[in-house]
C-alpha cells in the first residue's frame, strides 16, 4: 500500500477491510505495532470520531448496500453474532429495521 496515506487513513482501510471481524484494540495494535491509546488519540483528532465509531459506520453502510442487493441474512456476514443486536445497531444508524429498509429499497428496483 501507499506510503503517502496517513496512519489514520491506513487504520480506516484496515477497519474497512475487516468488516466481518468484531472490533478489537488488540488486533489493531498487532497490525500497526503501535499502542492503541496513541492511535486512538490520533484517529479521533484527525477523523472526528473513534475507531470503533468508524468501524460501526462502515459496517452499517455495508449493511445498507447488502440489504439493497441481496436477500440473504447479513448480520453474520458483518461480524454480528447476535441478529437482534445487529438489528438494534442498524435501527439506531438508519431509523429503520433491516427488514423495513430492505422493503423500502426494493421499491426502487
Image: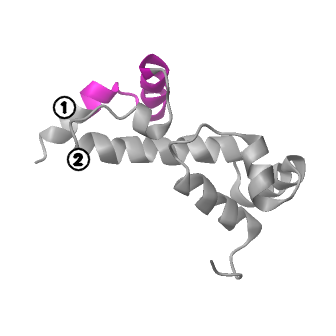
User: From which residue to which does the magenta span run?
Assistant: 83-101
Task: Judge depth for marks 2 and 1 and give the one in front.
Answer: 2
Q: How is the image coloured?
A: one colour
Q: Who is closer to the viewer here, 36 or 53? A: 36
Query: Tag 2's secondary structure?
Result: helix
Residue 86: in magenta span? yes
Instruction: Classify 24 as above or below 9.
Output: above
Residue at x-position 49% and y-position 25%: 81
Residue 25 coordinates in the image, percent (x, y): 76, 42
Instruction: Classify 85 as above or below 27.
Output: above
Main SS, magenta region, reads helix
Q: Which residue is mark 1?
A: 103
Residue at x-position 74% and y-position 57%: 31
Label 1 environment density (alpha carbons within 10 Å; few <14, some 14–19, many ≥20): few
Q: Which residue is mark 2?
A: 69
Residue 3 coordinates in the image, percent (x, y): 71, 81
Q: CA distance from mark 2 to mark 1?
A: 11 Å
Residue at x-position 56% and y-position 40%: 56
Instruction: Classify 48 as above or below 63.
Output: below
Residue 83 coordinates in the image, percent (x, y): 42, 21
Q: Which residue is most to the top?
A: 84
Q: Which residue is most to the front?
A: 30
Instruction: Classify 108 as above or below 82.
Output: below
Residue 77 coordinates in the image, percent (x, y): 41, 38
Query: Tag 1's secondary structure?
Result: helix
Label 2 environment density (alpha carbons within 10 Å; few <14, some 14–19, many ≥20): few
Left or right? Give the position of 25 relative to 22: right
The numbered mark, 2 or 1, whose residue comes first in the sequence reads 2
Left or right? Give the position of 12 relative to 98: right
Residue 90: in magenta span? yes
Q: Are marks 2 and 1 in contact (CB under 8 Å)?
A: no
Amino acid at each position: 500500500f501507499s506510503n503517502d496515506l496517513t496512519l489514520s487513513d491506513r487504520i480506516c482501510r484496515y477497519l474497512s477491510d475487516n468488516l466481518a471481524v468484531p472490533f478489537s484494540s488488540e488486533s489493531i495494535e498487532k497490525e500497526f505495532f503501535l499502542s492503541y491509546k496513541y492511535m486512538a488519540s490520533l484517529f479521533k483528532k484527525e477523523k472526528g470520531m473513534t475507531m470503533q465509531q468508524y468501524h460501526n459506520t462502515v459496517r452499517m453502510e455495508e449493511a445498507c448496500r447488502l440489504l439493497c442487493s441481496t436477500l440473504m441474512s447479513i448480520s453474520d456476514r458483518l461480524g454480528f453474532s447476535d441478529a437482534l443486536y445487529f438489528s438494534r445497531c442498524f435501527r439506531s444508524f438508519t431509523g429503520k429495521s433491516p427488514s423495513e429498509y430492505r422493503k423500502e429499497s426494493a421499491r426502487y428496483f
